[in-house]
Image (cartoon, helix red, strand yellow):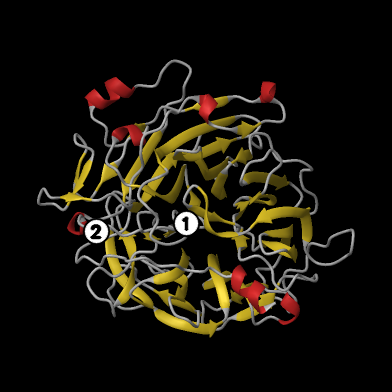
Amino acid sequence: MTILAALGRRIWVFGTLALIAGTLFARGHSALSTKPETIERETPDATSTLTAHATLIPENATAQDKAKGGAPVGRALLQVKLVDLIPASLSGETNQDSEPFLAIQPANPQIMVASAFTPNPISTKGNAPVYVSQDGGNTWVLNAITPVQRMTCDITHAISAAENHPRGDLHAGTLACASAITLGESETIDVSSSTSMSVQSTRSNVDQPFVRALAISNNDHIYVGVNDFNQPRGRTATVDVSVDGGSTYKSISIEARDTMGQDGPSIRPAVAGDSTVYAAFFGWRKFDGRTATSDVVVVRDDSAASGANPFQALKEPSDNLPGRLVVRGVSIPWSNSPTLGQERIGSTLSLAVDPNNSSTVYVGWADHGSKGDIYSLHVRRSTDRGSTWSAKDLPNTTIRNATNIALAVADNGVAGMLYQQFTGSRWITHLVQSHDGFATIQDTILATVPANAPNEQFLPYLGDYDYLLPVGNEFRGVFCANNTPDLANFPQGVSYQRAADFSRKTLTDGSGNPVPISIDPFYFSVAVIP
């Protein structure tokens, strides 16, 4: 059981990470054919599916650019922004800045915070940094405020507006890169300040914190999904809940059934404005060293998890225990070595609730699939608050050889699905939107880059997740990719902060000297389809 618990955690095999003063993380993507036949999507009823591959004009496009890239007849024209986060001052960096995340200030969406496995570029003993934008994602700077030395081994975060701090409150869950993995739950009321975040809670023997926040009256309610190996009987799926802005936390096991010794690493909370809180997790029932036999479980609480017995609202009819079994006994391959291209697999899970209708909730995951592929994505939906779920994958959501699914629902009810697909030679990053449960879709290719370069320095190569959020009439998100400055790799256009020669497809250090390609984080915004 101890060995299996160790396997369930994120195991970091770090190569040499160059720390060059003034470097940041964020890489680009490479070229790829975007012909529909290269995108392998299983469709239950192909005749009912309309796939619109949008030709998108970047916000900063010139008139000449628009003339060259105008949308063909029959294709939608959407506004897209895509930015490499690495600042110009850090143009010489070559880090593998993988596993991105994003938080947005709800009251002022110009304020955003992004993160990745980016080391402090100046000091090996200084705080790990985050990226901060105060102009809606056009520019980003590095701010070393995370209370972890040099670089995090996991970080997610969320911003709530309940306490009326214009550049806060940012709540983060971090893991330190140490032999005794320590969780830190911390806060800052001003993301532009150089003051280190205040640590509010710590403990060891947990994995993969995933943070969401909800404003209720004048209090921030914080939900941190963690795989907590301190929980008894191997029921490790846990949500840390704070109803007082992080001053105190209560750890709540949300697993009601027996496991093989632990649950899967991913525990994903999702919140709605009416105080409904969902969480999804992998209930591991068997594990043979390579494959986990798992249920996909969703729990719900109707009062912001503030009661005495949270997350008990959904019961499974077959055993009357808390937690609805969306699917049972799926095979999830577990590999902490390069398996899907240069990426590891085994922990892909996403959950999203309609912000204006908490009855509608989507869950997406990856498992072994059924056609000899390595790793397949699936999406199911509930329209009755998680009581029942679609019996089959929603149309156009069974995606072969893909990972890093991130789901979100916009204010108008449009569902968004971000994912990265491995084609054998390339990584293609998609954003799919739909009004009707993915029966008809608009598929925007954000990046298509070589999969064999650069060589991985550690795992995860791109990340165990990326992220997507709805903001008004936009979907905003982050992903990581090869940062070769080649416009063919970015069908919708791209903006680099770091020095890059697009004519020669070469990164430079700002003084004309070439810099090797690496993995960078990219921020994007895409207009929600009307």
Residue 222 image position (x, y, % from top left): 55, 71
Residue type (three-letter) at the residue carrying disc 1: Gly
> Which residue occupies the foreground of this view, 270 or 335?
335
Q: Residue at x 55, y 48 (%)?
A: 403
Q: Is residue 488 above or below residue 226?
A: above
Q: Is residue 465 above or below residue 183?
A: above
Residue, disc 1: 463
Residue type (three-letter) at the residue carrying disc 2: Glu
> Which residue occupies the foreground of this view, 228 or 291?
291
Q: From the viewer's perspective, is 182 left or right of 24?
A: right
Q: Crowding near pointer 2: few (<14 within 10 Å), some, many (20+)?
A: many
Q: From the viewer's perspective, is 80 left or right of 42?
A: left
Place residue 445 in its image quadrant.
top left
Q: From the viewer's perspective, is 67 left or right of 214?
A: left
> Which residue occupies the foreground of this view, 13 or 44?
13
Q: Crowding near pointer 1: few (<14 within 10 Å), some, many (20+)?
A: many
Residues at marks 2 and 1, CA–CA distance in whole angstroms: 19 Å
Residue 517 image position (x, y, % from top left): 28, 49
> Do callouts 2 and 1 mark residues in contact (Cβ within 8 Å)?
no
Specify the farthest residue to the left. Answer: 511
Residue 93's disc number: 2
Residue 89 image position (x, y, % from top left): 18, 58
Q: Residue at x 76, y 70 (%)?
A: 259
> Is residue 411 visible from the viewing direction of this image?
no
> Is residue 250 visible from the viewing direction of this image?
yes
Q: Residue at x 78, y 59 (%)?
A: 324
